[in-house]
Image (cartoon, rainbow, N blue to C red):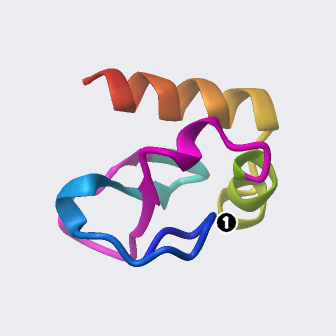
């Protein structure tokens, strides 16, 4: 389930991320994670939700997610 829009999609259609040491990164296989669908990456709600999850600055969060998406 996407943390932004709450849609239930297949895991292949979403990005699996985690917050570790107050930074967002791709899921490493250990610890808690969350999913974001590809449609919500450009959503206006994304920055507020990520600030709540990782307690980071809005601009840093959006840059990190866009870099991960490009990989």
User: Which quadrant of the figure contains the C terminus?
Assistant: top left
- Asked if residue 13 is positioned above or below residue 43 in the image, the reply reads below
Left or right: 68 in relation to 48: left
Residue 3: x, y in percent?
57, 70
- Asked if residue 61 is positioned above or below residue 52 in the image, the reply reads above
- Binning the other alpha carbons within 10 Å of mark 1 as few (below 14), some (14 to 19) or many (20 upward) gives some
Residue at 76 percent across and 56 percent down: it is 55
Residue 57: x, y in percent?
80, 38
Residue 39: x, y in percent?
50, 45
Left or right: 28 in relation to 35: left
- The stretch of residues the image draws in magenta is 25-45
Q: Quadrant of residue 34?
A: bottom left
- Asked if residue 62 is positioned above or below residue 20 in the image, the reply reads above
Element class at badge 1: helix
Camera-side residue of 10 and 65: 10
Residue at 79 percent across and 37 percent down: it is 58
Residue at 50 percent across and 35 percent down: it is 65
User: Which quadrant of the figure contains the N terminus?
Assistant: bottom left
Camera-side residue of 20 and 26: 26
Determine which residue is flagged by label 1.
53
Residue at 33 percent across and 21 percent down: it is 70
Residue 66: x, y in percent?
49, 26
Left or right: 44 in relation to 53: right
Q: How many marks?
A: 1
Q: Quadrant of residue 52?
A: bottom right
């Amino acid at each position: 389930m996407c943390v932004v829009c709450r849609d239930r999609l297949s895991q292949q259609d979403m990005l699996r991320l985690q917050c570790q040491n107050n930074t967002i990164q791709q899921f490493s296989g250990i610890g808690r994670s969350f999913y974001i669908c590809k449609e919500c990456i450009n959503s206006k709600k994304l920055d507020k939700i990520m600030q709540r999850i990782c307690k980071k600055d809005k601009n840093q969060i959006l840059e990190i997610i866009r870099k991960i998406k490009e990989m």
